[in-house]
Image (cartoon, grey):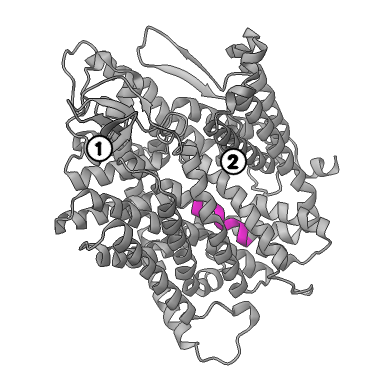
Amino acid sequence: MSESRTEFTLRAVILGSFLGVVFGLVTVYVALEVGLNFSASVPIAVLAITLFKRLGNQSILEKNIVQTVGSAGESIAAGVVYTMPALLFLGYRLELWRIFWLALIGGLLGVLFMIPLREYLVVKEHKKLPYPEGTACAEILISGEKGGKFARHVFVGLTVGGLYKLLMSGLRLWPSSVAWSTNAMRGAVVSMDLAPELLGIGALIGLPVARVIAAGSVMSGLVIIPLIYFFGEQLPNAIYPSQVAIGMMTPGDIWSSYIRYIGAGAVIAGGALLLVDTLPTVVSSVASGVRSARAAAGRATALVVARTDQDLSIVTVIIGSLVMLGALYALLAWKINPHGEANGVSVALVAVFGFFFVAVSARITGLMGSSANPISGITIAVVMLTCLLFVSAGWTGATYEVIAVSIGAVVCVAASNAGTTAQDLKTGYLLGATPRLQQLGLVVGVLTSVLVIGFTLTWLNGDSGAPVAVAAAPLPPAARLMDTGVVKNGRRFDVYAISAGNGVPAGRYLVTREGHVLAFHEPQRIGSAELPAPQAQVMAILVEGLLTHRMRWRLLLAGAVVALVLELCGVRSLPFAVGMYLPLSATSTLLLGALIAHFAKPRATAAVEDPFEPGVLYSSGLIAGGAIAAIAVAVASSFGWLDRFDLGRILGAGFLQSQSWALIVFLALCAMLWRYSRSRGEDSAAG
């Protein structure tokens, strides 16, 4: 590069950290809502160009640091949300300290384990591993003038998505969803969530993936649930694992008792099949990692290394990794499993699984991009292997459930961040950046995002709320005692954890000591239809089923066969399985966004992937705006402020709550997406 080598500056780090926090928050909400995440690297690169133009500096390497630091927040958030909410479904609270330390350890291990792999995966395999998002970011930064003009599409999408969500969910000027049902088919409800972020996600993931995800929801909501009612509504007795007769169950009860296990089986099988398919990549990646580590150690005594070949030293990598693994051991021994047997084994599992799947994640990201990275499959494999090892060793108590989730969380975050790290290093390689400074930037990105992500997750769950009264009901037999002597309204209660499929919603309950009757429920939004957290639900089912020997094998095997049938038809089963976990209201909106983007795209460019497309940038902004507004509404709700701003109720206009009015406003939002998806880059820039 002939330009200035100004690179790792304070303003670049601050701006990158800020953007990383923003897109990390967006990823938290989106991953909870639909179990997906989108690559934030391209919009961050575009925003970096625009903001630096106002600061009067044109150093491309400095902008690259902004993009590098900012990308860490999104990858860590995805890893956290895919795993940590599993603790809620097992009856534990989401504790901020736990999220912080596990995310920090996993995030830093992802960066450190990737460093010895950089030369092989990024440099030597340059022609074989394109790293699609990383290459796109390099193109954007090189075409700085063009990227600056196109940043307005991101800002417009962010503004439109944020205002729409605030007016809908905050001021309640129209309903947030519409639904239709018929008595001819009990349990079948056709619905649509009118959220802007779902529309944007659909536009980004594309029609092939969106329709498979929607098909999974159609199978659950419009086929299996009505069939269960048809065959079971006249039966007088409950069918295990439910404690309630089918005729008395709501569609949500049926999903909780039966569908979620079928979906989990499909997710497990789909993730396993995806890993098997990538097995050659796994083997070559691990072998290359070992070779690269030996080569790096052999160069430790070299006197001069070119700037563009400088990594953090192998000594730093080893010491940093040992410190992180030591911190994990201390966390287990101090807070989770004092004087327990499994702590040393757990740390060893994290070290082995972590490096192994970091190599896998980085290689697959290089081949197919972040969207194709099988993080879910990786985490499922880690959790299953961990639980099976624990069972063989006789470690099956409640504490080991927490340890298994913790191991899965660290490895999931490490693998997710490793894919992003490799992608960023590819961008830097194309631009002539200093790898060592990028690696330092990624460390800063991890440090600045982990605490905010934990706060956001607990806020969205509503952990600050007091227990709410529930209808008196007997304690299910499978409930587990979590705490004793909790005082509420002057009375003492025991706290029990109830998993799904026991006739009442899953969660933590305050139970009377006399007669063991449910009295209060600790509120949580994660796991509801609004924030289903599908990936974490699968993790909870695996951990609980394997460690308590209560796995619903027949339902899981039925789901596995569904995945196998899809694979035999030539369709990737993992998106379908995730769709089985999601409400049709969410996936129908994803499908609509994908359809708009597909048919609006000019035919001349239909087969060309262009990171500068106005529709792509506008959709990224739409996702960010909608998710940020949703988080703001959740915060306002936790303080009890929403009723003060409920204009729909204050104005008293009945039409504001009608489905027709909601559809009119939503169609206007769809029309804007069509307009941006329809326009071509050159035309929009000229305008």
Which amino acid, mark 2?
Leu
Give the secondary structure at mark 2: helix
Near mark 2 (Cα within 10 A), the count class, few <14, some 14-19 or many ≥20, is many
The answer to whether residue 572 is seen in the rendering is no
Disc 2/disc 1 C-alpha distance (Å) = 31 Å
* Residue pictured at 24% horizontal, 21% vertical: 473
| In the foreground, 497 or 551 | 497
Q: Which residue is drawn at 26% across and 26% down?
A: 518
The location of residue 528, given as percent across then percent down, is 41, 30
Pick the quarter of the image with the C terminus: top right
Q: Which of 129 and 631 is in front in this view?
A: 631
Q: Can residue 307 be seen in this view?
A: yes
- Identified by mark 1, the residue type is Leu
Q: Are marks 2 and 1 in contact (CB under 8 Å)?
A: no
Residue topped by disc 2: 204
The residue wearing badge 1 is 556
Question: Which range of residues does the magenta coloring cover?
Answer: 68-77
